[in-house]
């Protein structure tokens, strides 16, 4: 028996509802926090790209959860949705950090490596689920939650970094 044959969508509804609601709520909070430091974020490449990555990443976590919650889907459809949208998220993430590293001197590669590994883990989980392994959905779900936590730390670094620049007098 294929592992995905035992997939019961109703058992996952609360998980995706919780993660999706959390992601969209955090998106709003990050947006408000950014608007309070808009000038500092707009002029600094690291902050600007971190803001783009954080907002886009959280919005795409919400999108993955919303797509999974649509009714009457097979495990193949869910696996494909998770894989494609996470791939978009990974591309935005990597592009943003590569641009930030090229344009500024204050960003290290450790965050790009960590975030990329999290995205790849979710994509591997989604692919496994697509091919019929229920354990892939668990792997993708754990990676999605880890990615959300990673973006919370990015939002914190963004706000603290922008605040630090705001507090520094300019000549």
Image: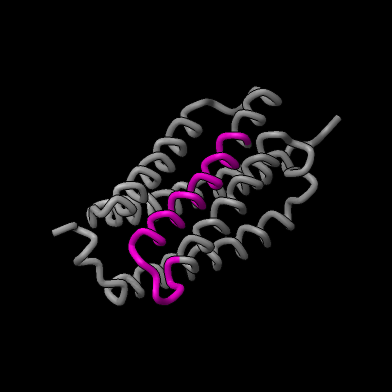
Q: Residue furthest left?
A: 1
Camera-nearest residue between 127 and 117? 127
144 left or right, relative to 169: left
Q: Residue at x 73, y 51 (%)?
A: 37
Camera-nearest residue between 74 and 37? 74
In the image, residue 17 sits, relative to residue 92, either above or below, namely below
Q: Residue furthest front?
A: 1
Q: Position of residue 14 (x, y in %)?
A: 35, 74
To which quarter of the image does residue 80 belong? bottom left
Q: Position of residue 74 (x, y in %)?
A: 35, 66
4 left or right, relative to 106: left
The quarter of the rendered structure image containing the N terminus is: bottom left
Asked if residue 83 is among those painted magenta in the image, a careful observer would answer yes
Q: In this figure, which colouring scheme has been used for the structure?
A: one colour
Asked if residue 86 is among those painted magenta in the image, a careful observer would answer yes
Q: Position of residue 58 (x, y in %)?
A: 54, 56
Q: Residue at x 49, y 68 (%)?
A: 66
In the image, residue 107 sits, relative to residue 4, either above or below, namely above
Secondary structure predominantly adopted by residues drawn in magenta: helix
Q: Residue at x 56, y 50 (%)?
A: 155
39 left or right, relative to 91: right
In the image, residue 90 sits, relative to residue 62, either above or below, namely above
Q: How many marks?
A: 0
In the image, residue 169 sits, relative to residue 82, either above or below, namely above
Q: Residue at x 67, y 23 (%)?
A: 102
The quarter of the rendered structure image containing the C terminus is: top right
Camera-nearest residue between 157 and 27? 27
To which quarter of the image does residue 78 belong? bottom left
Span of residues in magenta: 68-95
To which quarter of the image does residue 26 belong? bottom right
């Amino acid at each position: 028996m294929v592992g995905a044959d035992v997939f019961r969508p109703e058992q996952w509804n609360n998980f995706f509802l919780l993660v999706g609601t959390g992601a969209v709520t955090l998106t709003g909070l990050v947006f408000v926090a950014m608007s309070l430091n808009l000038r500092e974020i707009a002029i600094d490449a690291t902050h600007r790209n971190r803001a783009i990555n954080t907002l886009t990443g959280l919005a795409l976590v919400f999108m993955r959860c919303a797509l999974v919650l649509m009714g009457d889907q097979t495990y193949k459809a869910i696996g494909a949705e998770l894989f494609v949208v996470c791939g978009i998220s990974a591309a935005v993430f990597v592009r943003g950090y590569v641009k930030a590293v090229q344009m500024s001197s204050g960003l290290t590669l450790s965050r790009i490596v960590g975030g990329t590994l999290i995205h790849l883990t979710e994509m591997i989980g989604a692919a496994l689920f697509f091919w019929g392994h229920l354990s892939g959905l668990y792997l993708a779900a754990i990676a999605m939650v880890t990615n959300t936590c990673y973006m919370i730390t990015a939002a914190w670094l963004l706000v603290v970094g922008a605040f630090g620049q705001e507090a520094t007098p300019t000549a």
